Amino acid sequence: MELIVAVYADWGIGKDGTQPVALRADRKFFRETTRGAMVIVGRKTVDDFPGKKPLPNRENVVISRTVTEMPGFTVCRSVEEAVQYAKNAPRAMVIGGGRIYEEMLPYCDQAYITKLGCTVECDTYFPNLDEHPDWVASTLLEQGEEDGISYEMWLYTRK
Ligand SMILES: NC(=O)c1ccc[n+]([C@@H]2O[C@H](COP(=O)([O-])OP(=O)(O)OC[C@H]3O[C@@H](n4cnc5c(N)ncnc54)[C@H](OP(=O)(O)O)[C@@H]3O)[C@@H](O)[C@H]2O)c1
């Protein structure tokens, strides 16, 4: 299983249920990287999707203990159920948020990480993989600058 996330310089990823700063280049990278994959998402992050609708052209799986049905989504009641269900897909990607990243990181062996060159006040963080003994930044896939903010898209792999 794989994951994809955009982190600020201090590995913050969100505040008040949304991403305070998001770049067009990163949205494009996200669309292209997840195209055709099964995406697995926490219920709170779905609340931040436009119209709370599933992402188009991808199978959407939401993890929730409180919601039993969500149009356009397959609902899983636990991380273990989602991991089992994802075995049906040729490619499955965890797309957040904080709680789901934390719980599903042990099941992932590749992580697409956009590093944004700014620090923004956050209440949700991703584990710092640069200090994680099991992970290494293996390939720089893309880099640039947008609206004065530098960005780098890295592929991290499990050692
Ligand atoms: N920077 C990025 O790339 C990125 C990407 C995605 C999200 N985000 C940010 O992350 C933040 C949201 O993260 P979050 O941690 O608050 O919420 P979240 O991970 O999106 O969703 C948490 C919800 O998932 C369900 N859940 C979690 N663990 C579960 C388990 N073991 N079994 C069953 N259900 C489980 C629960 O839903 P119920 O309450 O329904 O039971 C829980 O409330 C937002 O600020 C968002 O913008 C950032």
Image: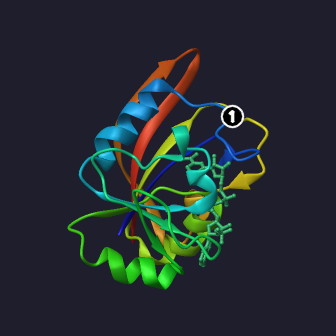
1 over 119 or under it: above or below: below
> Which residue corresponds to mark 1?
20
- Residue 116, x across and y down, in percent: 57, 35
Residue drawn at point x = 51 percent, y = 73 percent: 104
Looking at this view, is 62 or 66 the one in front? 66
Mark 1 sits near ligand 1, with its Cβ under 8 Å away: no
Res. 111 image quadrant = bottom left
Figure quarter occupied by ligand 1:
bottom right
- Residue 88, x across and y down, in percent: 24, 76
Looking at this view, is 59 or 118 the one in front? 59
Q: In this rendering, does residue 2 appear at all? A: yes
What amino acid is at disc 1?
A: Pro
Instruction: Give the quarter of the figure containing the C terminus.
Output: bottom left
Res. 157 image quadrant = bottom left
| Helix, strand or loop at mark 1 | loop
Residue drawn at point x = 42 percent, y = 27 percent: 25
Q: In this rendering, does residue 127 appear at all? A: no
Looking at this view, is 29 or 68 the one in front? 68
In the picture as drawn, the residue positioned furthest to the left comes out as 90
Looking at this view, is 101 or 38 the one in front? 38
- Residue 58, x across and y down, in percent: 30, 52
72 over 99 or under it: above or below: above
Q: Is residue 88 left or right of residue 140?
A: left
- Residue 13, x across and y down, in percent: 64, 47
Judging from the image, the colouring scheme is rainbow
